[in-house]
Image (tube, helix red, strand yellow):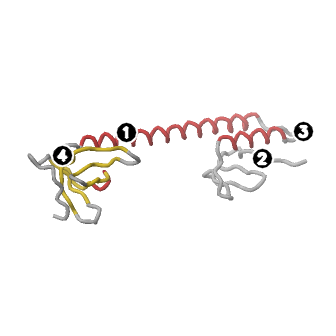
C-alpha cells in the first residue's frame, strides 16, 4: 500500500509523493504550494491512511486551522498592497501645484512645478514636458508663482 503524507503535524513543512517542501511552502522543484495543493494532500492523506492506525483528529484540526490561517494571511497581503497603491495615488495627487526637485531621465537634478498626476502601474507626475515617476522626487516645496516650467540640469 502507498502512503502519501499531507501536511506535517507541526505545520512547518509538508511532504508530497514527489519531494519535500521547505518551511516557506516552496517545493524543491520550484513550484509553490497553494490552497488547492494543500486540500489535495489533505484528501490523499485521509484516503490512504492506515485503517488500523487512523490520523489523529487533533492533527487534522490543526492542519485545517493552519490552512485557514494561510488563507487569511494571503487576503491581508492583498489588502495591504491595495492600501499601498491607494496611498501612492493620494501622495501623487497631493503634489499637483507644488514645486518638486527630482532626478531627470538623464540622471541630472531638475526642478519644476507638477501640473498633473497619472496613475498607471506606478504614479507619475507631469512636470513641464517631462513625466516623472513619484519615486524620483527628492524634494517638495510650495509652487513658485507663475512658474510651470521644468529646469532640468540646473
Crowding at mark 4 (Cα within 10 Å: few <14, some 14-19, many 20+): some
Q: Which residue is mark 2?
A: 5
- Image depth: mark 4 or mark 2 in front: 4
> Where on the picture, by quarter, is residue 46?
top right
Q: Nearer the viewer, residue 81 or 130?
A: 130
Where is 78 relative to 147, above or below? above
Of pointers 4 and 3, the one earlier in the residue sequence: 3
Image point 23% across, 51% down: which residue? 127
- The local secondary structure at tag 1 comes to helix
In-image side of 80 versus 61 (left or right): left
Image point 67% across, 50% down: which residue? 13
Q: Nearer the viewer, residue 69 or 122?
A: 122
Of pointers 4 and 2, the one earlier in the residue sequence: 2
Of pointers 2 and 3, the one earlier in the residue sequence: 2
**Distance between mark 4 and mark 1 Cα atoms:** 20 Å
- The local secondary structure at tag 4 comes to loop
Q: Are marks 3 and 1 in contact (CB under 8 Å)?
A: no
Q: Which residue is mark 4?
A: 98
Residue 82 on image: x %, y %: 43, 39
Q: Are marks 4 and 1 in contact (CB under 8 Å)?
A: no
Q: Nearer the viewer, residue 61 or 140?
A: 140
Crowding at mark 2 (Cα within 10 Å: few <14, some 14-19, many 20+): some
Q: Which residue is mark 3?
A: 52
Q: Which residue is mark 1?
A: 86
Q: Are marks 4 and 3 in contact (CB under 8 Å)?
A: no
Residue 104 on image: x %, y %: 26, 61
Amino acid at each position: 500500500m502507498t502512503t502519501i503524507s499531507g501536511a506535517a503535524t507541526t505545520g512547518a513543512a509538508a511532504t508530497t509523493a514527489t519531494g519535500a517542501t521547505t518551511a516557506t511552502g516552496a517545493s524543491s522543484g520550484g513550484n509553490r504550494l497553494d490552497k488547492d495543493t494543500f486540500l489535495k494532500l489533505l484528501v490523499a492523506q485521509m484516503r490512504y491512511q492506515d485503517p488500523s492506525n487512523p490520523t489523529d483528529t487533533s492533527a487534522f484540526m490543526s492542519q485545517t486551522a493552519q490552512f485557514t490561517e494561510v488563507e487569511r494571511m494571503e487576503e491581508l497581503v492583498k489588502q495591504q498592497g491595495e492600501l499601498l497603491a491607494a496611498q501612492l495615488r493620494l501622495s501623487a495627487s497631493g503634489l499637483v501645484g507644488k514645486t518638486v526637485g527630482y532626478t531627470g531621465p538623464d540622471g541630472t537634478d531638475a526642478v519644476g512645478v507638477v501640473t498633473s498626476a497619472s496613475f498607471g502601474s506606478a504614479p507619475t507626475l507631469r512636470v513641464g514636458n517631462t513625466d516623472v515617476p513619484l519615486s524620483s522626487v527628492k524634494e517638495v516645496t510650495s509652487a513658485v508663482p507663475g512658474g510651470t516650467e521644468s529646469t532640468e540640469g540646473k
